[in-house]
Amino acid sequence: MRTAVDSSVLLDVLTDDPAFAETSEAALRKAMAEGVLMVCETVVAEILPVLGEEALGAFFEDWGIQFAAGDLVSARLAGSHFARYLQRTPQKQIVVPDFLIGAHAQVHSDRLLARDRGYLREYFKELTVWIP
């Protein structure tokens, strides 16, 4: 089982978020026991300011997280869903990186571990979203 991990879940653990750290860490451990954890470049970019460049490799190694780069297929999927979102939502509340993570997960993994605000399930209907 390949589980893509959203930055929201990793940031819960990295910042020891009082509301979400415990459940996010438990979900990460369960996903790790069931297979491979993976992230795309967008997730790396979003967690790096909190984690720091020096600690990135060790953090990925400790959690068994693999990096999987996006491709044209996932980028186009993200763009098409983002375009639809912009047509439906006059005041933009979700940004392109959220769509890149969702599209990458749909194309390159079996599921996405994320604290979804609803847009993942709405726009990525073929993606299994696991909310810790």
Image (cartoon, rainbow, N blue to C red):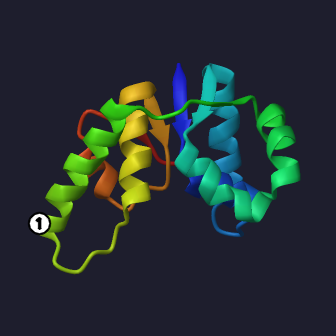
Left or right, residue 79 beside residue 115: left
- Determine the residue located farthest toward the left in the rendered image: 87
- Determine the residue located farthest toward the front in the rendered image: 72
Quick check: can you spot residue 115?
yes
Instruction: Give the image quarter of residue 14.
Output: bottom right
Q: Amino acid at mark 1?
A: Gln
The residue located at (86%, 49%) in the rendering is 55
The residue located at (63%, 61%) in the rendering is 20
Disc 1 element: helix
Left or right, residue 89 beside residue 8: left
The residue located at (58%, 49%) in the rendering is 43
**Where does residue 52 sit, x and y in percent of width and height?**
81, 58
Q: Residues within 10 Å of mark 1 (few under 14, many from 20)?
A: few
**Where does residue 94 sit, x and y in percent of width and height?**
35, 67
Q: Above or below — where is 32 with respect to 35?
A: below
- Determine the residue located farthest toward the bottom in the rendered image: 91
Q: Pick the residue in front: 102 or 48.
A: 48
Q: Report which residue position mark 1 lands on.
A: 87
Q: Above or below — where is 39 with respect to 94?
A: above
Image mark count: 1
**Where does residue 42 sit, x and y in percent of width and height?**
53, 50
Quick check: can you spot residue 21?
no
Instruction: Give the image quarter of residue 107.
Output: top left
**Where does residue 79 sit, x and y in percent of width and height?**
26, 49
Left or right, residue 105 beside residue 56: left
The residue located at (55%, 40%) in the rendering is 40
